[in-house]
Image: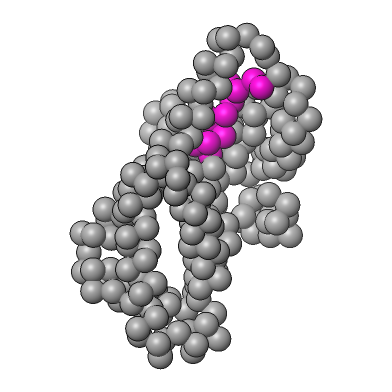
């Protein structure tokens, strides 16, 4: 949120490039559009979102704070969704899952809820990997080992110096493409194997670091 603060007027506010001028039909649809696209509320929504984050970190009655973070985050995301990627959707889902967590309570019911939330977050993360892997298997580029090669041609993402470095190294790009394909497909199964969990997670960190550098997707 603070990262996007200098661009707040472009994403949200009366001068935004994402302004919606016509509402849908029906009470529910108009209420939804009123929440997300009423630009007179944006400063309040943005402020409540930041306060909610700080409040949740403090930990006092954090369930209310996390609920505010989720609601305002949902409103901010969908009022400028062309700007953000699917990683924000995943963060919103996790925020929703984390609302009922209470790590300060010693009640058995709280421990049950906390464990259920943890399982829900893990399952959601695994589903992201599984669907990404299956989607790659249904295409041609990744099976041929050229998926990363074509990804680097997206000038809006990868920097010029990186394209000049790797586009001439077809062998390295093919190895990295097959690594991404195999890793995303095998991760949902191998993550449950205790002996290789840590090396698998380390490989995952390097994998996402590579995505951040090669495609400039740091978020």
Taking the image as shown, residue 172 lies to the left or right of residue 60, namely left
| 154 to 44, vertically: above or below | below
Taking the image as shown, residue 86 lies to the left or right of residue 38, namely left
Q: Residue at x 51, y 68 (%)?
A: 210
Looking at the picture, tell me which residue is in the foreground, 189 or 112.
189
Taking the image as shown, residue 143 lies to the left or right of residue 187, namely left
Give the color scheme: rainbow, by chain, secondary structure or one colour. one colour
Residue 207 coordinates in the image, percent (x, y): 48, 62
Q: Give, as a single range, the part of the protein colored magenta.
A: 92-103
Taking the image as shown, residue 38 lies to the left or right of residue 130, namely right
The answer, for residue 217, to whether it is visible in the render is: no
Looking at the picture, tell me which residue is in the foreground, 26 or 181.
181
Q: Residue at x 32, y 60 (%)?
A: 182
Residue 118 coordinates in the image, percent (x, y): 51, 29
Q: Residue at x 59, y 14 (%)?
A: 110
Please give the count of numbered marks on the rendered protein.
0
Residue 141 coordinates in the image, percent (x, y): 26, 71
Q: Quadrant of the rendered structure where residue 74 is?
A: top right
| 12 to 71, vertically: above or below | below
Looking at the picture, tell me which residue is in the foreground, 100 or 118.
118
Q: Quadrant of the rendered structure where residue 140 is?
A: bottom left
Q: Residue at x 28, y 74 (%)?
A: 145
């Amino acid at each position: 949120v603070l990262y996007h603060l200098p661009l707040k007027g472009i994403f949200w506010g009366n001068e935004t490039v994402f302004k919606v001028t016509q509402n849908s039909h029906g009470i529910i649809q108009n209420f939804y559009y009123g929440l997300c696209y009423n630009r007179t509320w944006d400063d309040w929504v943005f402020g409540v979102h930041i306060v909610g984050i700080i409040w949740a970190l403090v930990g006092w009655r954090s369930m209310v704070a996390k609920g505010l973070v989720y609601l305002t985050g949902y409103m901010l995301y969908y009022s400028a969704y062309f700007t953000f990627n699917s990683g924000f959707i995943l963060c919103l889902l996790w925020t929703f899952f984390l609302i009922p967590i209470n790590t300060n309570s010693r009640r058995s019911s709280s421990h049950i809820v906390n464990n259920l939330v943890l399982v829900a977050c893990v399952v959601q993360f695994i589903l992201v990997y599984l669907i990404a892997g299956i989607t790659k298997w249904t295409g041609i580029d990744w099976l041929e080992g050229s998926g990363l090669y074509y990804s680097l041609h997206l000038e809006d993402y990868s920097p010029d110096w990186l394209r000049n470095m790797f586009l001439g190294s077809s062998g390295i790009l093919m190895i990295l493409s097959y690594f991404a394909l195999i890793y995303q497909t095998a991760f949902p199964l191998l993550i449950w194997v205790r002996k290789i969990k840590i090396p698998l997670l380390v490989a995952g960190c390097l994998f996402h670091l590579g995505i951040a550098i090669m495609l400039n997707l740091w978020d």
